Image (cartoon, helix red, strand yellow):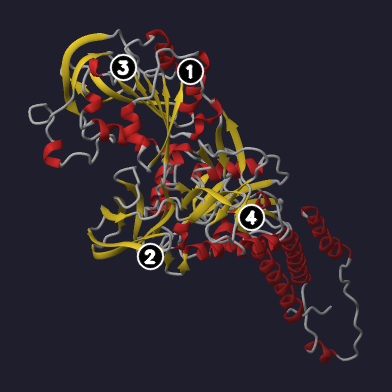
């Protein structure tokens, strides 16, 4: 447009070739001389010069106005004429449901994005990013389509950190064809997501942070739930603990908390909680039915309500399958304990007649005085433990230590030493171990020695090694300091090593009163205990150790209300089935893993509690972190009374001068008119 300045020469040419010549006026009477207004040649030249200059300045001002001059606010600012590509992130997590002075933060964020778009030209391109990271948003659109997409944003359980969002934007901007690329992040910048220390910003493209602030940043929420004991039996009491967090400056009294199971209210509790603390609420109740149990723990709070409910799922086993692999003969003690109890589906199987394909059907396998382990059995037991099974080893006096050592070392578990004959007894029981939790009365269980407790005698035993690299837990310990019963993790399962055979020649454990609760609890603990709940957006894999799937089958994930279902991905490894959710669950609630018409597993999904912590990074804190980590192209747009659209224009287009030159052009034209109208020349 500056080539138009050549038009300034036109007034010069006109004035050079259009000199006014003085002409003679003939008159017969000198009295006409008084009526003639005389003008000198110098006055005429001055008037013509002023008119010429005003015309030149008017033309120059118009040309400069069309050239859109500006004063850059940054050294590396892109010219306003460039085609801009603008990536805008709107935080639509649940924390954005908090209220500000202008309404919900999410609505304020939508309006801020609209103002940013208004600060750019209609020919520029825009890209929207929200927490779902959906593919439909990873494209450039015009401003009208961008504004339409903003109106479709809804709150989501997905939680993204600042580093994840910036990395997503950078990946989207790779290969862009715009002359200018700018990113905006509109969020409340919760402390849990503002991880600027993990950010690797683009050194070429500017990035602007737009922090929003809620009027009331207080929240009372259920943080987590767990059972005191993992064992669930019919008609036996259990105790659920719910941790409630008061993330506010207000003390609460007599807050009601309700537990519902399978749609029926099971228990109600109330509690007092002071500001800025958490409180564990104990909820005792009794299960009366076997099978999958769907529980809801809930409180009432406002305005942040997404974390007022906790959906849990647990299983009350009707019958726990237990397999005894017998070396020589069946054990009368095991038959008496498990064979006549309807709580257990007890099966005896001789060593030479094992159906390896059925091992995964059992929650607990007991190796009852099996002298030697074959290579095939070792392989199958290893897979069984990797899939989460429990194994109890009762040694034989003729134990082949070599084969057991090979097996136990392969699963990273301590092993047996040489058979030892020594008269001793059990003197210590770990009452905090799950095997004996709640077995004894408190005043008896507190006794750690054998002075007041009648504990088993030992005549011979296999010493169990203690390798520091393994997580061995002594459940029962003998007087000589050697373990009597140990528990160790192996794969996803557990291995229990008993140091003594059940024969009377090795001691009286099989006939002792403690034999029943010890093995009974081991069997109960072997029942598959899945997580009480999963976190939406965080857990994408659900393991199933014994789904008993065969033939042609299709697994489906179905909501408890039946209004939503999908077919998940599935991976199989060593008979362990992994169900892949792949972020297809977005609403908190109860779900079933369904095979045909049978519900084979229950799942509870809850929203991420990271959003519940109402701590935010304001403009000052963000600026401090930007300076700390040296982000030269990152800036914070704070509220300073100026509309956001104007702030965006100032930052991205500089101080625009075209309006000034339009005004100057009008002023020069007006000056010319005044000269021509009121400075009359006569010759």
On-image quarter of the N terminus = bottom right
What numbered label is drawn on residue 378? 1
What numbered label is drawn on residue 241? none
Depth check, mark 2 against mark 1: the one in front is 1
Q: Nearer the viewer, residue 10 or 459?
A: 459
Reading the image, the residue beneath label 4 is 70
What numbered label is drawn on residue 215? 2
Q: CA distance from mark 4 to mark 3?
A: 72 Å
- So how many labels did they put on this image? 4
Depth check, mark 4 against mark 3: the one in front is 3
State which tag comes first along the sequence, 4 or 3: 4
Q: Nearer the viewer, residue 602 or 22?
A: 602
From the top left corner, tell me how far across and down residue 633 is, in percent: 54, 43
State which tag comes first along the sequence, 2 or 1: 2
From the top left corner, tell me how far across and down residue 389 is, in percent: 44, 31
Depth check, mark 2 against mark 4: the one in front is 2
Identify whether 405 is placed above or below 168. Answer: above
Q: CA distance from mark 2 to mark 3?
A: 54 Å
State which tag comes first along the sequence, 4 or 1: 4
Q: CA distance from mark 2 to mark 4?
A: 38 Å
Reading the image, the residue beneath label 3 is 468
Q: CA distance from mark 2 to mark 1?
A: 64 Å
Q: CA distance from mark 4 to mark 1?
A: 80 Å
Q: Bin the neighbour count of mark 2 within 10 Å (Cα to Cα): few under 14, some 14-19, many 20 and up.
A: few
Residue at 46%, 19% (x, y): give it: 351
């Amino acid at each position: 447009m500056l080539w138009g300045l050549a038009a300034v020469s036109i007034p010069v040419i006109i004035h050079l070739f259009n000199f006014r010549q003085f002409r003679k006026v003939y008159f017969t009477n000198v009295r006409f001389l008084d009526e003639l207004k005389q003008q000198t040649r110098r006055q005429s030249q001055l008037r013509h010069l002023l008119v010429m200059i005003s015309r030149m300045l008017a033309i120059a001002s118009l040309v400069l106005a069309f050239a859109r001059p500006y004063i850059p606010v940054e050294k590396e600012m892109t010219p306003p004429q460039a085609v801009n590509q603008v990536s805008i992130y709107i935080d639509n997590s649940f924390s954005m449901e908090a209220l500000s002075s202008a309404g919900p933060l999410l609505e304020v964020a939508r309006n801020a994005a609209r103002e940013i778009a208004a600060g750019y030209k209609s020919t520029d391109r825009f890209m929207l990013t929200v927490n779902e990271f959906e593919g439909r948003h990873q494209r450039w659109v015009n401003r009208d389509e961008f504004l339409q997409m903003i109106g479709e944003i809804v709150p989501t359980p997905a939680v993204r950190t600042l580093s994840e969002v910036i990395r997503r934007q950078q990946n989207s901007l790779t290969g862009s064809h715009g002359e200018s690329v700018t990113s905006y992040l509109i969020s409340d910048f919760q402390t849990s997501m503002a991880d600027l220390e993990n950010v690797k910003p683009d050194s070429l493209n500017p990035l602007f942070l737009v922090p929003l602030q809620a009027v009331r940043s207080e929240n009372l929420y259920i943080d987590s739930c767990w059972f005191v004991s993992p064992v669930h039996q019919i008609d036996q009491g259990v105790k659920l603990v719910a941790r409630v967090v008061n993330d506010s400056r207000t003390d609460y009294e007599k807050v009601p908390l309700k537990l519902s199971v399978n749609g029926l209210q099971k228990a109600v509790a109330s509690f007092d909680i002071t500001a800025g603390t958490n409180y564990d609420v104990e909820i005792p109740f009794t299960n009366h039915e076997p099978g999958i149990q769907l529980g809801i723990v809930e409180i009432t709070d406002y305005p942040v309500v997404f974390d007022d409910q906790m959906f849990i799922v647990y299983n009350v086993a009707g019958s726990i399958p237990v397999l005894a692999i017998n070396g020589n003969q069946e054990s009368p003690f095991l038959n008496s304990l498990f064979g006549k109890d309807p709580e257990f589906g007890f099966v005896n199987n001789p060593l030479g007649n094992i159906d390896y394909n059925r091992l995964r059907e059992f929650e607990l396998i007991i190796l009852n005085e099996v002298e030697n382990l074959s290579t095939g059995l070792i392989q199958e037991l290893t897979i069984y433990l990797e899939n989460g099974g429990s194994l109890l080893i009762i040694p034989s006096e003729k134990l082949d230590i070599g084969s057991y050592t090979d097996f136990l070392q392969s699963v990273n578990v301590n092993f047996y030493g040489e058979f030892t004959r020594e008269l001793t007894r059990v003197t210590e029981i770990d009452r905090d171990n799950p095997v004996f939790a709640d077995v004894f009365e408190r005043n008896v269980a507190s006794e750690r020695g054998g002075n007041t407790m009648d504990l088993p005698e030992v005549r011979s035993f296999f010493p169990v090694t203690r390798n520091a690299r393994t997580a061995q837990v002594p459940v029962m310990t003998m007087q000589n300091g050697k373990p009597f019963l140990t528990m160790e993790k192996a794969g996803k399962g557990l291995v229990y090593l008993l140091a003594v055979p059940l024969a009377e020649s090795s001691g009286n454990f099989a006939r002792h009163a403690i034999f029943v609760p010890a093995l009974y609890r081991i069997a109960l603990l072997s029942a598959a205990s899945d997580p009480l709940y999963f976190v939406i957006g965080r857990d994408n894999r659900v393991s199933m150790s014994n789904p008993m799937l065969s033939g042609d089958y299709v697994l489906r994930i179905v909501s408890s209300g039946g209004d939503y279902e999908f077919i998940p991905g599935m991976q199989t490894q060593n008979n362990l089935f992994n169900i892949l959710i792949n972020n297809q669950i977005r609403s908190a609630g109860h779900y079933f893993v369904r095979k045909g018409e049978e519900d084979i597993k229950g799942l509870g999904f809850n929203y991420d509690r990271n959003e519940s912590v109402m701590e935010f990074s304001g403009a000052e804190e963000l600026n401090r972190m930007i300076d700390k980590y040296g982000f030269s192209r990152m800036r914070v747009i704070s509220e300073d009374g100026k509309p956001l659209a104007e702030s965006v224009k100032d930052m991205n287009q500089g101080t625009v001068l075209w309006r000034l030159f339009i005004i100057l052009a009008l002023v020069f034209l007006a000056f010319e008119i005044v000269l021509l109208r009121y400075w009359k020349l006569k010759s």
